[in-house]
């Protein structure tokens, strides 16, 4: 039985004889706001799927949408099972939590560890969405060459031993970064640096796609509309992602939404202009990529900086992430969707800029948060705190993700790399037997025979369907 009642104004009152004070009032407006933000962040996950899907060739389009929804399903179970407890148990160590809330035991009407204005049950489901989108961002690195079955196992293990510890040390009151004084409002390290670096590790492990470095992989996104739709979902949901991190419908949440929108806008324009200087074309994909980069950069700072700073976050986020897309050519890894350039590098940029531009006055918009601020407030050590948190998140995610991948590599049935035949045929057909569209033109690559695979995959299609199937206009699309 929940231990709550209502006061004369209709607010929820929680009573605990062992606590001091014994009663806690939950504002139903705040609760409604966070419930709406939870739904907004959920919407971001399929947004990631559409964004990634549109950037690929059509024969791999459905697999990315599937991977995003699979992330929601697996992580939601993991979060119920032990993820929430490992990240947010009050008796956590500086590195990881305990199993105090295993199976969500005892997670109900008591005040949350994040804010006494909302109950633990609501805080739990809101934070679950953050874990879901982090996994979805990371596994995008399997694009065009990863197996979809083993990825379910990978997501469960990765969320448990990579995301949960980093979330604990960043946001749990006992976490070492939190105690040190690191500032991360909505997930610069736990969400973006961790997912981007994991994507880098996955890309290195999987190796290069067939035809890497040739014209075969010099394709344009097969569906720019998907890219735009994915960006719309992400931009829209980011108001719940950053604004909701205030955990209350207050002025700080409003400010977070304002700087989020500014940074996305400036980031989109910056990336598009940088691409225009080369192609002399106004690229919708470039604008969308820049908007996402601006959103990534402002995430850790959204509750700490003013609107003028948001312009700089958007500009530097868009510009630096744009140039970071060239790292894969310099270092020789195949990151098909530039996840590391956008989320890994963008998260680091956002973290470091937070150390420079965080203001105590902005953090205090909620009426109770007190921080020493960053360089603008003459608190110069803050940059070192941000750097330490960023380096720790980067190193931990890369090393542990690589270990997970190689352990799975030697377990029968769990190897993540798809076969060459599956890569040529397309992950959608080889792994799912379904397609994003009513047709997918398949063209045999020169010098490679696919008769056994094609015969098997085409068995369910009638001869009429095969006779009417349109041919691929370009072998790389």
Image: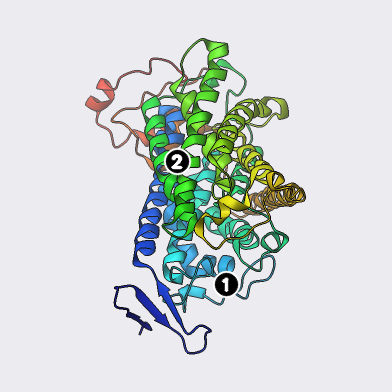
* Residue 469 can be seen, yes or no: yes
Residue at image point 53% right, 39% down: 307
Q: Position of residue 182 (x, y in %)?
A: 68, 55
Image position of 407 with respect to 12: above or below: above
Residue positioned most to the left: 464
- Picture layout, residue 196 above or below residue 38: above
In the rendering, at what x and y percent does residue 334 appear? 62, 31
Q: Is residue 145 visible?
A: no
Q: Residue furthest top?
A: 280
Please say if the residues under marks 2 and 1 sit with CB atoms less than 8 Å apart. Answer: no
Camera-side residue of 399 and 264 = 264
- Give the residue furthest to the bottom: 17
Q: Nearer the viewer, residue 353 or 46?
A: 353
Provide residue 427's location: percent of width, then percent of height.
45, 36
Q: CA distance from mark 2 to mark 1?
A: 29 Å
Task: Read off the residue under disc 2.
Answer: 48
Tell me if residue 258 comes above or below residue 270 in the rendering.
below
Q: Which residue is depicted at the point 67% across and 25% down?
A: 329
**Residue at position x 53%, y 30% in the image:** 267
Mark 2 Cα-neighbour bin, 10 Å: few <14, some 14–19, many ≥20: many
Q: Is residue 23 left or right of residue 313?
A: left
Quarter of the rendering containing residue 412: bottom right
Mark 2 or 1: in front is 1
Quadrant location of the N terminus?
Answer: bottom left
* Number of residues whose C-alpha sits closer than 10 Å to that of mark 1, classed few (under 14), some (14–19) or many (20 or more): many
Q: Which residue is mark 1?
A: 89
Label 2 or label 1, whichever comes before in sequence order: 2
Place of residue 282 in the rendered image (x, y in percent of width and height, measured from the top left): 46, 16
Q: Residue at x 41, y 80 (%)?
A: 14
Numbered disc 1: secondary structure: loop
């Amino acid at each position: 039985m929940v231990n709550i009642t209502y006061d004369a104004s209709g607010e929820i009152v929680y009573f605990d004889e062992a606590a001091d004070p014994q009663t806690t009032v939950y504002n139903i407006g705040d609760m409604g706001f966070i419930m709406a933000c939870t739904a907004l962040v959920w919407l971001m996950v399929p947004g990631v799927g559409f964004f990634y899907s549109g950037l690929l060739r059509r024969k791999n389009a459905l697999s990315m949408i599937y991977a995003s929804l699979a992330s929601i399903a697996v992580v939601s179970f993991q979060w119920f099972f032990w993820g929430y407890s490992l990240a947010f148990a009050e008796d956590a160590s500086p590195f990881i939590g305990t199993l105090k809330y295993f199976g969500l035991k005892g997670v109900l009407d008591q005040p949350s560890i994040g804010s006494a204005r909302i109950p633990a049950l609501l805080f739990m489901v809101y934070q679950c969405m953050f874990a879901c989108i982090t996994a979805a961002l990371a596994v995008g690195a399997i694009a065009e060459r990863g197996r979809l079955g083993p990825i379910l196992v990978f997501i469960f293990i990765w969320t448990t031993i990579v995301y949960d510890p980093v979330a604990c040390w960043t946001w749990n009151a006992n976490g070492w970064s939190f105690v040190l004084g690191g500032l991360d409002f909505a997930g610069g390290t736990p969400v973006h640096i961790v997912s981007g670096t994991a994507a880098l590790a996955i890309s290195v492990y999987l190796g290069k796609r067939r035809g890497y470095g040739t014209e075969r992989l010099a394709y344009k996104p097969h569906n720019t509309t998907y890219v735009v739709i994915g960006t719309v979902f992400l931009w829209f949901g980011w108001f719940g992602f950053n604004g909701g991190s205030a955990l209350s419908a207050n002025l700080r949440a409003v400010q977070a939404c304002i700087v989020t929108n500014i940074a996305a806008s400036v980031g989109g324009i910056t990336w598009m202009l940088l691409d225009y200087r080369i192609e002399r074309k106004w690229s919708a994909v470039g604008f969308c990529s820049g908007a996402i980069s601006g959103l990534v950069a402002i995430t850790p700072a959204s509750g700490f900086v003013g609107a003028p700073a948001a312009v700089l976050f958007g500009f530097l986020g868009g510009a630096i992430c744009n140039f970071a897309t060239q790292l894969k050519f310099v270092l020789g890894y195949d990151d098909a969707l530039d996840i590391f350039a956008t989320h890994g590098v963008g998260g680091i940029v956002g973290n470091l800029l937070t150390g420079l531009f965080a203001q105590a006055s902005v953090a205090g918009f909620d009426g109770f948060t007190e921080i020493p601020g960053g360089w603008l407030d003459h608190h110069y050590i803050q940059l070192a705190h941000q750097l330490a948190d960023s380096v720790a998140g980067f190193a931990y995610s890369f090393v542990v993700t690589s270990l997970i991948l190689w352990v799975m590599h030697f377990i029968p049935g769990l190897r993540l790399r798809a076969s060459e035949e599956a890569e040529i045929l397309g992950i959608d057909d080889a792994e799912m037997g379904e397609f994003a569209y009513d047709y997918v033109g398949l063209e045999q690559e020169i010098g490679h025979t696919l008769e056994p695979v094609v015969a098997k995959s085409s068995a369910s299609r009638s001869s009429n369907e095969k006779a009417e199937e349109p041919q691929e206009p370009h072998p790389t699309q």
